Image: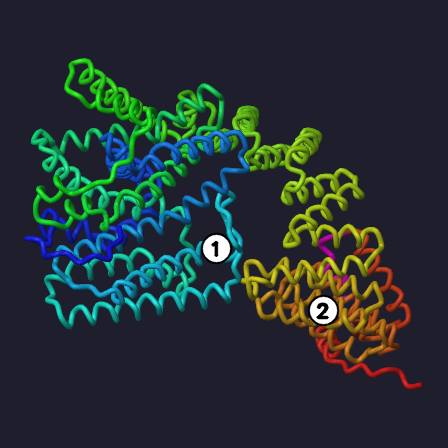
Amino acid sequence: MKTTIDTPRAKSPWIYGPALDLTVGCGAWSAPLLLLGALQSSSHAQGWAAAFYLLAVVFNYPHFMATIYRAYHTRSDFSKYRLFTIHLTLLLVLTAVLAHASFRFLPWVFTLYICWSPWHYSGQNFGLLMMFARRSGLQISAGERRMLYWAFVASYLMLLISFHTGPSNDPLILSLGLSARWSVAGRVMAAAVFLILGASAFFRLAARSGSRALAAPLTLYFTQALWFVLPTLLVLGYHLSIPQTRYSSGLLAVLHSTQYLWITSYYARREARAAGNPAWRMWSYFVTLLAGGIALFIPGPWLVSLLLHYDFSASFLIFTALVNIHHFILDGAIWKLRDTRVAALLIDGGEKTAATAPETVPQAHSSAQSSTGAWEWLTGSTPLARGLRVALVAVFLLWCGVDQIRYFLSADESNLAHLRRAAILDPYDATLQLRLAGAEATAGETTRSLAALDRAVAANPGNPGPQHARARALLENKRYPEAEAHYRQMLARFPRDPDALVSFGLLSSQRGHVDEAIDNWQKALAVDPQQASAHLYLAQAFEQRGQPAVAARHYQEYLKLSSVNGPAAPANARPIISVGIALADALARAGQTSQALQAYQSAIVLAERNHDPHLSSLALAHSADLLERSGDVTAAAISYQRGLALDARVGDPATEAADWFNYGQFLRQERQRARLIYACFVHAEDLLASTPGKELETVKELRRQAESQLGPQAAAIRKNLSAILTEAAALKVNPPKP
C-alpha cells in the first residue's frame, strides 16, 4: 500500500478497535510469540512443525485466497486487473510446467520466493503505517514519507544481505556469496539508516501530533524492527544462523497472514455494504478463504504426484513458490491507497464515498467475461450453485485432513511405522522416501532401505540429493560395483556435480583406478575450486606417485581453504595439523628444506595452541629428522628432546618407544656417549615389551649391539636407567669439529 495524498481525518483511527488493531494489525503480539517460538521450537521440533503446518492451513492459505477473492470476485475488478488475473496467471502456469519438467528451474523460482517474502511483509507494514497515519489525521510531509519508506527499505536490505552472505547451505536457495567483511559493513550501515531515518521522522511527527495518533504507526515501526532488524543484529552479535525459510514458512509468515486477514476482512465487509449487500457474513467469508486457500496449495501437488509419479515435495515447493509470487505481484497491484475506491473503504468515514468512487474499468475480453460469469454463477444463490459450493468445501476440507495426517506421519523420522503408512498414501515423495530409508537402515532392514532410496531417485531423477544418498548407502554396505555403476549413471546426468566427482574419485582410488580418481578430482576442482577435499585426495595420490612437489601444492591449497573461516576449533584442528605435517614431509622430500621446516613449525604451533601433544610430538620428530639430515644437529637434538618431553604426557608407549629409538640412533650417528645411546635403546625396548613384532625385534638388535660394546657397564646403566635417560634428554649436542 502506498500513498501521497492527505485526506480529512476519519471518525476513528481504528479498524476493529485499539486492542485488536494494535495486537494483530500492528503486530504488537510479535515479541511474545516470537520469543515463545524460539524457546519451544528446539525442544519440541516435531510438534512445532505440525503446529505450523496447521497454522498455515488456517491462516496462511486463506490470506492468499483473500487476494484472489479481492481481484476475481467481481467482473469489474477482474477486468481492471486483467494483466495480473489473466496474463500473469498464464505466465506462472507455464513456469510451473517448466519447473516440473526440469528440476534445475526450482532453485531459481524458490530463491525468488524466499527473497521476495520479506519485501512483501515490509511493504504491508509500511502500507498499514501510512493508512493509520491518514486515518488519524497525521499530516505526513513528502520528506517524512520518504524517510519512513527508506527506513523500511533499509531493514529489508539488512535481511537480504544476510541471505546472500557466503555460500548457501540449502541446495534450493541460491546465494550471491557476498564476503563476510562487506556483508557486515552493509548490514551495519542499513541498521543505522533504519534507526536514523525512522527516529528523525517520528520525532518530527511527535512534535506536532499526540501519542494517540502515533500509537499505531509507531507500533508498526517497532514491529518492522522486531521482524527484520533485531534478528540480523543477533546474527551479527552472537553469530547465530537463521535459515532463510524461517521468514517464509515459520511464525513470521503466520503473523503476516493474520495481519493480512485482519485488514482484508474489514475491506470486504465495507465493500459489501457499499455495494448494498447486507447478507455478507464474516464466517461465510472465512470459509470461502479457507476452502479456496486449500484449493490453491493442496490438490495440485497431490494430483501431479499421483498421476504423473512426480516427487510430491518438489511439486509442493513449486506450487508454494509460484502461488506466493502471484500473490506478491497481484497484492502490489490491488492495494494502493492512491486508488480512490481503496482509500474510500480503508480511510474515509462512510460507504457512500466508496459506492460513488469513480473507477476506470477497461472493456472486458470474452475470456474475462466468461471467467467472471462462471464465478458469479458459482457464488450465486441457485440451489445447484449452493450445493456445488458445499460439496467443494467438503471435498477440500477432507483432502486437507488427509494431507495433514500424511504430513504428521511423514514428519516423525524415527517412527518407522508412521513413515510406512505415509508412503502408502503417496509413495512418490523423495523426501519421505529418504526418511523411510534412514529409518529402515536404523532398523537393520538394508534391502528395504535401498529400495526406498531407489524410489526416491525414481520420483525425482533431476534432484542430485537422493542420488547422493543412494550412493552413500551403497558404499556403507560395501556394494562397491553397484556404487561405481551408480556414480557413472549419476555423472552422466550431472557431469558438473563436484561432490559426485570427489566421491567417485575416492571410490576409484580405493578400487585401484588411480588415474581415473585423479581425473575426477581435477574435474571437481575445475567446477568448484573451493573443494578442499579434492585437493587433499590429489595431494595423497601424487605423493604415492612420487611427485612430492605437486603434492605439496595441493596440501597448501587444502590448508588455505580450511583457514578461510578463521582459526580452526579444537574439534576440527586435528586433521588440519595432520595435513600440515604431511605438507612439511612433502616439501622435505621435494628438497625444499627451509619451507618444510617452516611448515613443521606452523604445525607445532597449531598443535600446541589446540593442546594436542601427540601431533606436536610427531611434528617435532619429523622436524628433528630433517634438521639432522640438513646438518643442524643442535636444533635436531632440541626437537627430539621436546618431542620426548611431550611423549611422557601423551601416554602412548608405541610413539614414545619410536621417539626414544630414533633419538638413540641420532646420538649414535653423532658419536655421543655409548651409555646414553644404550639407555635410549633399553627404554624403547621396555616400552615395546608388551607388543611383540618387527619394531621390537629391530630395537632388540640395536640394543644388543650397543650392549656388546659396553660390556660389564651395561648392567650398571640398567640399574641407573632413569637418571641416565634424564641426562640424555637434556644433552646439548654440538656439531662435530672439522
Considering depth in this image, is 262 or 681 the residue closer to the camera? 262
Q: Is residue 507 left or right of residue 562?
A: right
Q: In this view, does 235 lie to the left or right of 213?
A: right
Residue farthest along the bottom direction in this orientation:
737
Residue 164 is labelled as 1
Considering depth in this image, is 166 or 293 the residue closer to the camera? 293
Q: Is residue 414 visible?
A: no
Q: Main secondary structure of the magenta part?
A: helix
Residue 599 is labelled as 2
Whole-Å distance between the Cαs marked 2 and 1? Answer: 35 Å
Q: Position of residue 225 (x, y in %)?
A: 29, 60
Q: Earlier in the sequence, mark 2 or mark 1?
A: 1
Residue farthest along the right direction in this orientation:
738
**Image point (77%, 78%), residue name:** 635
Task: Give, as a single range, the part of the protein colored magenta.
Answer: 682-692
Q: Are marks 2 and 1 in contact (CB under 8 Å)?
A: no
